[in-house]
Image (cartoon, rainbow, N blue to C red):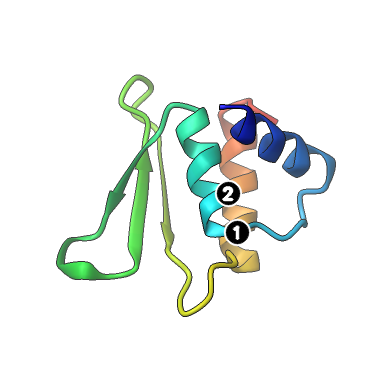
Amino acid sequence: MAKGKKILAKLEQNPKCLLDWGELCALMAYLGYTKKDARGGGAGTKFINSETKKYLACHRPHPGSQVCAGARDAVVEHLRDIGVI
């Protein structure tokens, strides 16, 4: 779980930093979210927190692994909304 904490600190320090899909998955797992992929094999993914009923919907990047700026901004906004950063 130390990886998630480092990624959170990275986003707090620089909300415009580059974010890899694996880092996003590790961060959301650290915060208690479960990843649920879209039906039918699409790129859509939801991160769901079963305790708070909050979720974050985004698309898995392809063909690379870097999260696009719009998705990264949505992650930062979500983290601010739930009071994490």
Q: In which quarter of the image is residue 77?
A: top right
Residue 62 falls left or right of residue 9: left
Q: Mark 2 points at which residue?
A: 23
Q: Quadrant of the N terminus?
A: top right
Structural crowding at the residue carrying mark 1, measured as other residues with C-alpha within 10 Å and reported as few (<14), some (14–19) or many (≥20): some
Q: Name the residue under label 1.
A: 20
Kindly indicate whether the residue at mark 1 contacts the one at mark 2 (C-beta within 8 angstroms).
yes
Q: Which residue is drawn at 64% across and 56% down?
A: 73
Residue type at mark 2: give it. Glu
Distance from Cα at disc 2 to Cα at disc 1: 5 Å
Residue 25 falls left or right of residue 72: left
Dot 1: what SS? loop
Please state the horizontal and vertical placement of residue 52, each as a whole percent of the image. Answer: 38, 22
Q: Quadrant of the C terminus?
A: top right
Residue 77 falls left or right of residue 53: right
Query: Could you say which disc has been placed on residue 76 in the image?
Result: none
Please state the horizontal and vertical placement of residue 20, each as a whole percent of the image. Answer: 60, 59
Of residue 62 and residue 45, the one placed in the foreground of this image is: 62
> Which residue lies most toward the front here?
2
Dot 2: what SS? helix
Vertical position of residue 17 compared to residue 63: above or below? above
Residue type at mark 1: give it. Asp
Structural crowding at the residue carrying mark 2, measured as other residues with C-alpha within 10 Å and reported as few (<14), some (14–19) or many (≥20): some
Please state the horizontal and vertical placement of residue 35, each as a whole percent of the image. Answer: 34, 44
Q: Residue at x 30, y 26 (%)?
A: 50
Vertical position of residue 41 compared to residue 2: above or below? below
> Which residue lies most toward the right here?
13
Please state the horizontal and vertical placement of residue 82, each as a whole percent of the image. Answer: 56, 28
